[in-house]
Image: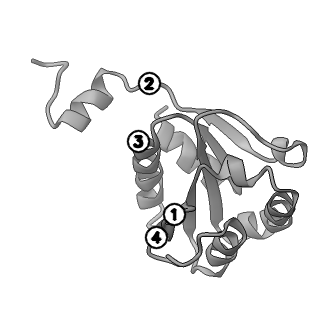
Amino acid sequence: MSVSAEIAELWGAGAPLLYLVTGEEERAVALCRAAAEGFDARLAVWSARRGVERLAPAARDPLAALEAVLAAPAPVLAVLLDFHLALRDPAVARAVRDALPRLGAEGRCLAVVAPRLELPDGLAGDAAVLRVPLPDAGDLAYLAGFDLVHT
């Protein structure tokens, strides 16, 4: 099963919090975009520098970003870059924990993208962790725009 299919399956099953362990942010965003397209859903990408692109660019603070995602029309998949750093703040971790039931019930999902797994104890049991493997020949061919397997 592809990673984007796994993301879609978990989200479709109501998982409100995904954690993608990878150093390849652009690839993780592309995988999430593919999953969101399967649901005809909105994709929102957050970073502390850019805010929530397309939804709330001024929401650079993690708590403001979470509020923007909760206010967005569902379905929405919010990709949170380097959010593992924000989760070190007990107030942010608590806000995420409080939002989990609502996120799952309303068709919203948070996808934390980080180079290493770092979850506070209170969220460790609630997150579906996906370790994004290195791209295979098919992934590389797709990214390069041609089929390496048949050349």
How far apart are labels 1 and 3 at the CA level? 19 Å
Secondary structure under the numbered disc 3 in the rendered image: helix
Secondary structure under the numbered disc 1 in the rendered image: loop
Among numbered discs 1 and 3, the one appearing first in the sequence: 3
Secondary structure under the numbered disc 4 in the rendered image: loop
Mark 4 vs 3: CB contact within 8 A: no
- x and y, in percent, of residue 132 in the image: 53, 32
Q: Which residue is mark 2?
A: 134
Q: Amino acid at mark 2?
A: Leu
Q: Residue at x 49, y 26 (%)?
A: 133
How far apart are labels 2 and 3 at the CA level? 10 Å
Mark 2 vs 3: CB contact within 8 A: no
Q: Amino acid at mark 1?
A: Arg
Q: Which residue is mark 3?
A: 27
Q: Quadrant of the C terminus?
A: top left
Q: Amino acid at mark 4?
A: Glu
Q: Which residue is mark 1?
A: 49
How far apart are labels 2 and 1 at the CA level? 27 Å
- Badge 4 density bin: few <14, some 14–19, many ≥20, Cα 10 Å: some
Q: Nearer the viewer, residue 29 or 150?
A: 29
**Mark 1 vs mark 3: in front:** 1
Q: Residue at x 68, y 37 (%)?
A: 129
